[in-house]
Image (cartoon, rainbow, N blue to C red):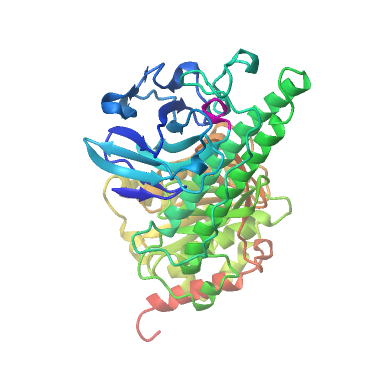
Amino acid sequence: MTALTRGANAPLPARRVTATASCAVPVDVSALLVGTDLRVRSDADLVFFNAPEAPGVRWADAGGGQRVELDLDAVPADAAAVLIAVSLTGATTFGTVPPPELRLTAGGEPVAEFTVAGLGPEKAIIGLEIYRRDGRWKVRAVGQGYPGGLAELVEAHGIEVDDEGDRADPADPAPGMPAPPVAPAVGAAPREHVPPSPPPASEVGYVERCWLVWEDASRSLAAFLSSTEHALTLRNEEIAGRQPRGRFEQLMAAADQRLRSDAAQLREELARVEPHITPEAAPFDAPAWLTWQPRTDLAEGMLLGRLSTAELPDLRVPLILRLPWRRGVWVSRGTMPGDSAAYAWSLATRFLAAVPPGVAGLEVIDAAGLSGAGWLHGFDPSTSARLLGGGVATGPAAAERLRRLLDLVDLRRIGGDDDRSSAGPPIRLVVVLDAGAALAGEEAHQILRLVEDGPLVGVPVLLVETDTPTGDSVRAMRVQQSCNDLPSSAGSIGDSWVGAEWTLTPEVLPDAAGGTRAPALFSHVLGTHARAIAPHGQ
């Protein structure tokens, strides 16, 4: 059984699970089916004792203990998650009783449990979130509290409740839908700060940790925006005189405190693991680069930059591209000339640092020859031949290089190989400079084929929009849709869980100089690879 802490998650080993809660006082257990915005599709998505069934979710109370039974295969495709809620009735708050415990079981065997510590005036909490991820189901410990009880909780997730005037007295709430107290306290008690400590050996890897932190931050941000939207609706009611004043400020303060608490925990998660990361996933000014040595195995991933959002100003999440690449990478033009080329050579440096010597090399194509990459011809002939495909290919040589790479891709797709490839490394990172011009030229179809088929057979593609803006042809759009699209200067990027907008600040070598000269670190990494694979005596 997995013991979860707030914000942690774990895979579910079964598709049929049961959620229960235990507490020193009686509690009600309920569930909400929600979309990616953490809001219900309709009021029918609330499952509790007065509405005990929804697709894939069933409430039961056999033997005196409430439970929610989940058949995850039956949960509708447009429901991204099931939230398990625990609530109190009457004047009791969770801060006055021992922490409640939530448990998931499968076939009677415990799967995960979560003790929700650090509660104060809350009368209802979202305890667990059972959610889809890449076709699998996982469980996350949430612990988000609501001083206004179940009514406030369900309102924050899109359920309409009766107006205040239609409710019973707060001391005697309606069954299953308690009304909020007249003047609830604000926010949850902050968790005690724990200094960062080294991660245990059983903890997930750094790449996975960064993605989990981004996902958790995105979901916390979505919950915050949902709560503030609900609070703004109440403010309108207060202005119109249909609700007593003061509730808006209380809800906003509680939402802000929950978001800050979540952000603090996520910062601690990153602080615990970042001292142990390897260079390819570290900023260029990190001490790890001072002692860089060639790897003996393929790295998990490489750093692209840092993600931030205005609502979480103190949280910067590393964006890590997993290795090996399964899709092409598109680097768009930046705010200044040369931004995209500088970022491209920074990514190429990380790529080489992430693979063992002899495994990968670069194939650089610039049909127009205007991107300023002629410095690639300044390396010694053996390095150029072994690791750079002979240098940057321009003019007719660019078309020939592209044709040769497509021949290699086609042979690998059918399980063969090309004898001519024996002189070069098995992985060829193809860097297409001035991609906008390339997609407007005669080789556009070949580039599309390379992007769609190359990454899966050891020929990943990095397309760099340098001089010519990309047109809006169908082929150009297909190429971009087949790639991970990255801004080369601070720009927007959306997450894949709730669609929140983040700002990606690319990690760029300080001396990249717009791609017009060799960055020192690129030369160092390339030279180290060349020396490692040079025949004895050279």
Please indicate, yes or no, whether residue 153 appears anywhere in the rendered image. Answer: yes
**Residue at the top extreme, as displayed:** 166
Q: Position of residue 249 (x, y in %)?
A: 71, 35
Q: Looking at the image, is 337 positioned above or below residue 177?
A: below
Q: In the visual, does 446 lie left or right of 263?
A: left
Q: In the visual, does 508 lie left or right of 525?
A: right
Depth check: give the residue in front, 399 or 361.
361
Depth check: give the residue in front, 251 or 429.
251
Can you say which quadrant of the picture contains the C terminus? bottom left
Q: Looking at the image, is 438 positioned above or below residue 25?
A: below
Q: Which residues are magenta?
A: 148-152
Depth check: give the residue in front, 90 or 151.
90
Task: Name the residue: 44% across, 38% down.
Answer: 127
- The image quarter containing residue 355 is bottom left
Q: Inspect the magenta stretch and tell me whether residue 157 lies in it.
A: no
The number of numbered discs placed on residues in the rendered structure image is 0
Q: Position of residue 283 (x, y in %)?
A: 57, 65
Q: Position of residue 532 (x, y in %)?
A: 40, 77
Q: In the visual, does 15 lie left or right of 220?
A: left
Magenta highlight: main SS: helix
Q: Position of residue 149 (x, y in %)?
A: 54, 30
Please indicate, yes or no, whether residue 382 appears anywhere in the rendered image. Answer: no
Q: Looking at the image, is 432 positioned above or below residue 28?
A: below
Q: Looking at the image, is 151 positioned above or below residue 512?
A: above
Depth check: give the residue in front, 363 or 524.
524
- The image quarter containing residue 70 is top left
